[in-house]
Image (cartoon, grey):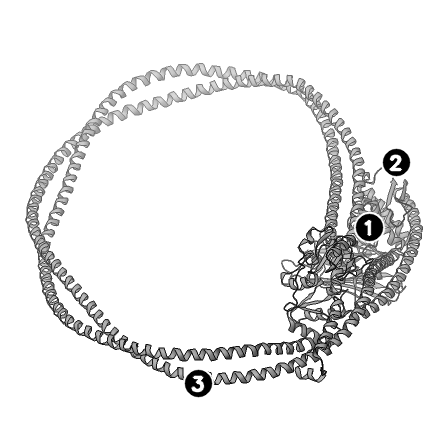
Amino acid sequence: MYLKSLEIQGFKSFPDKISLTFDKGLTAVVGPNGSGKSNIGDSVRWVLGEQSTKTLRGNKMEDVIFSGTVTRKPMGFAAVTLNIDNTDKTLADYADEVAVTRKLYRSGESEYMINGKQVRLKDINELFMDTGLGRDGYSIIGQGRIAEIVGAKSNERRDIFEEAAGISKFRYKKHEAEKKLSSAQENILRLTDIISELESRVEPLRIQSEKAEKFVKLAQERKQLEISVWVHRLDEFKAKLDEFEEKILVNKNEYENIENDIAAEEEKIQLGYRKMQESTVKAEEYRQKIIEEEQTSSTLKSDIAVYENDIKYSNEKINELISRKNDEKSAKEKLGDEIKNAEKQLDELNNKKSNIAKEITIITEQFKQFEDEASRLSEGFDKYSNELNALYIKESEIKFSAEAAERTLLETKQTEESIYRKKEELSSGFVNYENDIRKLEKKLEKLKSTSTEIKNKLNGYGILYKSRQEGFEKAKVDFEKTLFELKEKQQKRKLLIDLENNMEGFAGSVKNILKASKQGRLGGVFGTVAQNINVEAEYAAAIETALGGAMQNVIVENEDIAKRCIRYLKEQKGGRATFLPLTSVKGYELKEVKLDSEEGFINLASRLVDYNEKFSGIINSLLGRIVVADDIDSATMIAKKYGYKFRIVTLDGQVINAGGSFTGGSMQKSAGVITRKNEIEKLDAEIDKLTLERDSLKDKAEKIRSEVEKLRYDAEGAKEILNQNENEIVQVTSEINSLIALSNQNENQLDEIKRQLDENNKKSETAKGILCENKTKLDEICSRIKEYEEKLTESEELKIQLHNQREEFTQNISSLKIAEMEISKDSQAQEKEIQNLLNALDKFAEINEKIDYEVKQQELIIEEKNELISKRKSELENFKTNSEEYQKQIVYWQNVHNQQNIAVKEIQKGLKAINESKEKIMGEVMRLEERKNTIQRDYDNIIKQLLENYEMTRSEAIQIAEKLDDVSKAQHELTDIKNKIRALGNVNVGAIEEYKEVSERYEFMSKQLSDVKASKNELEKIIVDLTEEMCKIFSESFEIINSNFKSIFTELFGGGKAELILTDPDNVLESGIEISVAPPGKVIKNLISLSGGEQSFVAIAIYFAILCLRPAPFCILDEIDAALDEVNVRKYAQYLKKFTDTTQFVLVTHRRSAMEEANVLYGVTMQEDGISKLLKMEQVDFQEE
């Protein structure tokens, strides 16, 4: 069997469909980092059933689908097909070519196919089991996986060795057998509980069934006798009803005659009332007219007052307007005087302005003459100034030359000082270098000491790591133990829940009713008594005993619902059940007040259960007269004291019945439906506790694991510090050597300093000669400058005097111009004021006209209001005359009302006597009706009882009723039958059918339990056989792999020793596998101390050892040579070629030595970002390149 080809589409960086064909031998896949070459190995792992997204280098399974780029849309699915040549029939029952396909859609749906036929993941795993392929096999070694073989814990290395030994299929069969065994154990537990439940029910149901059969027989006798008595009584009631009906009819006729007389008299009374009403209405109409007249008079008086007030206001307004007109006249005269004064002030301002203009003209002429004199004086001043500037320039040049010479002297002096300082520094440098060298040597010693301490600390970490690892293993064992116990409890709870949901323990008829109610076919059903009560565990046995078969009685809303349920059972032939309607079943608690003080008395049974208040009548009827006692002795004492009047139940289920009979014996534990509910609640509490314990242990294990990880991290940190320390030692040594070299350079620098000092002295002498010559020239220039400065000072004083006079002229002219502007401004303001006064004068005429108009308007208003007042006074006189006439009419209609009232009272006196006769007859009718209704109720009750108890009408009852010669004797017999039925107590009629059903179920379950136990024994034998076979095969295979590993290790490393060791040889199937190696010339205590390349070579040696035992059909090796140097890569590749006869290899690599050994090369590039492209190259082409 070998790999023919691989087809990829939409997987990771391969959006387009590609196909890789493989020949026997060695194929290499090459490409730069990030090109997507490792995605080819991932695709093979994925199609073989890998479910770990971490192994596939992703976060979620959807990540394997091409996610798109800037230029390409995401794909909707990923598909990979593996085509395998199967001509050697390695895969039995399959064709010569097998195509395995896996598809994943972005919606999350996935498909597995073998040769185009859809299969399960399980089928893929079974197909490649023990071939070395598959997700747990050694056919695909991914990036970093080769190092995991060395770095993994001893118990984590087992998978690859089991696959190589070929026991994976056996382990799978064992796992399946263990699953079936676990399922069988669960079934045994479930069946045992069910059988236990059924056993506890068979005997009580047999007793209940016999009791029910007796009850049915008595019920039939009661029915026949009761119907006969009822029919007899119905006939009697019918005769009496007819008699009363006739008497009632006579009285009703007489009653109707009186009713007619009363109606005639009442009509007369109504006529009188109507006339009284009419006279009252008339009188009221006239009263209303008087009120209206008075309201109108009041309105007229109010209008007159308003009009008089308006006249008063208008007169006041006229006086106000006349006064205002006089004020306006005075204001006009005053305004004329103000205009004359304003015009006079304007003339004065114009004269002032003319005088200021003349003064400005005179001063301007004087200023012009002064400017000419100043110009002449300025020309002489400029001449002296130019000559003086020339002397200043010459003086500056001489001074600059002198300063240059002084600078040169200063520089030579500073240079000399610098040279001497440098000389001193170089001299002291020898001392400093020696001090630094000594300090660095001390530092070197300290670094070496620190390295020793870190090495000791690393040894300590190793010891502590081992201790914490052991703690972690213990915590893991405790966690698994708690987890097992939790699962056990959960399984038991599940079984009880199933029993509860399947209504185990209830009669078939009750189940039928409850199912129909749940499906909505029967409304108004509240469930059984057992389902509607809650009982504490300690009272459960007592309550179950007290209720007995009544636990299965069904609570319904009313009698109609009960009848509907009975009809349903009859129609469905679903058996018989007892129904408890809320409207008819009433019960009361026992009223023995001294019971509380009795020794051993616990409570009434009805008070020991919790239930909905609406069921109180039913609970009291079933449990209200039953006492719960501590034990049988206490119960006996109480029963004796109260004369065996009520039933007593003990906590362990013993019973003393009313009348003195005792019932008792052993009881099956956890048998009843109420006890089952309590058991479920108890299990819930235990599961919650175990869940918390499990989480706590999980956290503890996680904490220890974190500590182990921290120790590993600290050890790695210490190693890093050690490496840094070693590097620093090298650096300090280098610094010491550098300081010695610098000390040697100092001597050469001192010779150079002496030469610089001689040159500096020569420059200093030249600068001193130049300074002497410049001093003579400077004295001569200074004398001439002094002469010209004196002449220039005299000119400057004259210039200042002229400047002051000029300032004085300028100020005078400015003052005069400012005064001229202020006068102009005042003139303009005065002109504006005059204009405003003239405008105000023009408005006075307009105001006077307006006042005259308003006076005339007020006079017109006064005239109008006077006319209105005269009109209103005339209307008032007319209203007074009308009111007197209305008052006369009121008196007339009041007299009519009084006369009619007297007539009505006379008629009412006669009517009272007639009503008394009517009431007497009515009383007789009511008495007769009441007696008739009483008999009718008795009649109806019997009819109702016939319908409710026996579902038959009177005519149906007459057909089956027997003729009674002696009704009293029949009544006595009926009473005896009822007492016998009552003595039977609570009867479960459904027990007859239920007993039959439970007996059959018990036999069936017992047979099933026997079959499951036989199956369990067979599975246990299979598991033992498989375990022995696996131990044998694994031990033999492990010895071969170990032998191969020893020889291959020696060959690859050129010597040394290596061995694979089982950590627990007595338990080879669970034992960890340790790797012990010693490369040539090394002593290795821990694999971690090997270099990365050495670790990889150890893992490769193990891999080759496995291939020697069981060659895989094909292998994909993804960069397992990454940590090897070029020499070892070549050695690894050449060794790999030894296996190409039996195994086909696909190498993902970028090492040239590995490529050279390949028969075919595939190149993977990423010409477009995010999209991998595939190129095929034969080995001949590669070698030519």
Residues at circles 1 and 2 in contact by the CB criterion of under 8 Å: no
Of pointers 2 and 3, the one earlier in the residue sequence? 3
**Quadrant that contains the N terminus:** bottom right
Nearer the observer: mark 1 or 2; the answer is 2
Image side of residue 852 versus residue 388, left or right: left
Q: Residue 913 carries which label?
A: none
Image side of residue 1023 versus residue 190, left or right: right
Q: Nearer the viewer, residue 1140 or 401?
A: 1140
The picture quadrant where one finds residue 370 is top left
Residues at circles 2 and 3 in contact by the CB criterion of under 8 Å: no
Residue that mark 3 sits on: 257
Residue that mark 1 sits on: 1154
Q: How many numbered markers are drawn? A: 3
Three-letter amino acid code at disc 2? Gly
Residue 1162 lies, in percent from the top left, at: 78, 57
Dot 3, crowdedness within 10 Å: few (<14), some or many (≥20)? few
Of pointers 1 and 2, the one earlier in the residue sequence? 2
Q: Distance between the residues labelled 1 and 3?
A: 134 Å
Q: How far apart are marks 2 and 3 (CA)?
A: 144 Å
Residue that mark 2 sits on: 1081
Q: Distance between the residues labelled 1 and 2?
A: 28 Å
The picture quadrant where one finds residue 976 is bottom right
SS at mark 2?
loop
Three-letter amino acid code at disc 3? Asn
Of pointers 1 and 3, the one earlier in the residue sequence? 3
Three-letter amino acid code at disc 1? Ala
SS at mark 1?
helix
Residue 534 lies, in percent from the top left, at: 69, 58
Dot 1, crowdedness within 10 Å: few (<14), some or many (≥20)? many
